[in-house]
Amino acid sequence: MTQLPPQLHYLHHDQLSTLCLENVSIKQLATQVDTPFYCYSKAGLVNNISACKAAFEPENIHIHYAMKANSNLSLLRIVAEQGLGVDIVSIGEMQRALNAGFNAQDIVFSGVGKTTSELTAALRAGVGQFNVESKEELSALISVTSECQQSVSALIRVNPEITVDTHKNITTGAKGNKFGVSFNDVLPMLAAAKQSPFLNINGLAMHIGSQIHSVAPYLDAIAKIRALLNRLEAQDYPLTHLDLGGGFGIQYRDNQALNKTDSTAAQHYLTFADFANAIKSALPDWQGRLSVEPGRSLVADIGVMVSEITYRKESQPTPFLVLDAAMNDLMRPALYQANHALIPVQQPRSSLLTQYDIVGPVCESTDTFAKSVQLSSELTAGELMCFLDAGAYCAVMSNSYNSRTIIAEVLVDDNQAHVIREPITQTDLMAFEQHRRLAKI
Ligand code: LLP
C-alpha cells in the first residue's frame, strides 16, 4: 500500500483518527491559522538532507540546494545549518541565501538571463560560482569582472541535447531548450575567457530537467560531456569541475494508490544513492570536483497544503468538492497537470467511496486540482483536507490572482508549530497601489 510521507500519520483518539504532522494536529492548527495554508515538517527536511548527504558526500559530490523549489527563510536556515551550499537563479534568491546564513562562496548562480546589474551584485557579494549559459553572458561577465577588478570562478553550462522522460514543460537539456550552450560553443568561449585576467573557467555544468525517474539520461549526458572534456583537454583546456544539476524525481502519491490495500502496485522509485552510484559509475577515473543541485527531492514530501471544503456541490455525473484553496495557491495541477493526492484530516468512519472533481474558487476552468478522484462519501462542507507532497514548487509559485491572499506557511517541529510566513493580504498588496506610495515619473 502506498504510504503517507514519514512525518504524517493519523492519531487515533476517542474513536476518531486525526491527521498529525510530526506531533501537531492539523485540525488544531487550523483553529489558529486561516485555511488554506502550507505546513512543513522540520524532521522531514533534516531527514531528507541526511539521506542526500549520506549518498553523495562519501563519493565526494558537493550538494547545492536549488532554492527555487522552496525559498522560505526558515527552511533555508535549516539547509544552511546542515552544511549544504545553495543554487540560486536571481539576486532575490541571493539576498535570501545570504540572509539565511549561507556563505557567498557556497552559492552557485545559475540562470539563462542574468542581467549586468545581477552579475555585478553577485560579484560584489563574493558568489563562489557562476554557471554561464551563453557567449553573450560570458562577455557581460568578463566586462563586469574587469570593471570591478575582481576575479571569479565560472562553469559553462552545456546543453547535452538528450531526451528525458518527464513533463514537456520541465525538460531543460533537450535540443531547442533555452538553457546552456551547444558543445560547439564551448571551445570559443574558453578561448575568449582566457583573454580575461579575472575570469577562471573551471568546468562544465548541466541540468537536464526535473522529476526524472531514471539514471539513463544522466548516464547519456555524462558520457557526452566526458567525451567533450577529453577533446578540450587535448586542446589544452583541462577542466576540473563538473556540476551535474538536479532533477532527481520523487514519488508523488496519488489517491488511487492510497486507496489500494495491496502492495503489488508499488513501483520502485530511485533514491539519492541510486543517482550517486550512477554518477560515480559514469565517471570512474574522474579526479576533479563534482557537484549536484537537488531541489524537489529535498523538500517536496515535507509539506502539505491544508484546505477546507467550502461546498460539496452536487452535480451529475460527478459531484464537485469546491475547496477554499485555488490554482493561485497551488499551480502545479493547472500548469503541469500534476497530481497531488488529497486526504481528509479527519479519517472518515465509513469506507464508502464517491467519485469527485476537486476544484477551487478561481474563475478559470483550469482551477481544477483533480478529476474523478475516489474519496470518502461522507465528505461535506467544513471538512479539512490536505494536499500531499506540497513542499516543492508550491508556495514559491503562488500568486494573488483573483485578488486572493498569498497564504501562510507554517513549520512544525515535534509538537511545536510556528508561522514562518504571514499571509500576504490584499491590504498589504493594495498599499503598493495607494497614491502616497506611487512615484511620479
Ligand atoms: N538546477 C537548475 C539549474 C535548475 O533549473 C533546477 C530546476 C534545479 C537545479 C533543481 O531541479 P529539481 O532537483 O528540483 O528537479 N516548477 C516545476 C519544476 C521546475 C524546475 C526548474 N529547474 C515543477 O513544479 O515541477
Image (spheres, rainbow, N blue to C red):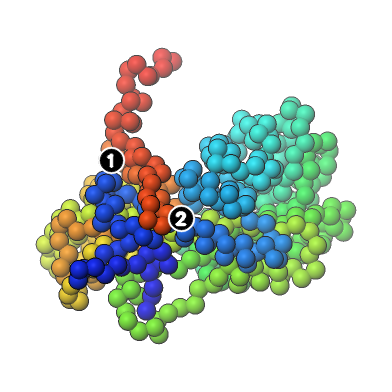
Front-most of residues 84 and 183: 84
- Tell me, yes or no, if residue 134 can be seen here: no
Q: Earlier in the sequence, mark 2 or mark 1?
A: 2
- Tell me, yes or no, if residue 84 can be seen here: yes
| Res. 404 mark | 1
Q: Position of residue 136 (x, y in %)?
A: 67, 39
Distance from label 2 to label 1 (Cα)? 28 Å
On screen, residue 138 above or below 263: above
Residue at disc 2, secondary structure: helix
Residue placed under numbered mark 2 in the picture: 42
Question: Hey, which quadrant is residue 41 in on the image?
Answer: bottom left
On screen, residue 291 above or below 102: below
| Number of other residues with Cα within 10 Å of mark 2, as a class: few under 14, some 14 to 19, many 20 or more | many
Which residue appears at 75% of the width and 57% of the height? Answer: 289
Residue at disc 1, secondary structure: loop
Question: Hey, which quadrant is residue 222 in on the image?
Answer: bottom right
Q: Of discs 2 and 1, which sits in the foreground?
A: 2
Q: Is mark 2 within 8 Å of ligand 1?
A: no
Contact (Cβ within 8 Å) of mark 2 with mark 1: no
On screen, residue 319 above or below 421: below
User: Split into 4 quadrants, where in the image is the N terminus?
Assistant: bottom left
Front-most of residues 418 and 285: 418
On screen, residue 89 above or below 307: above
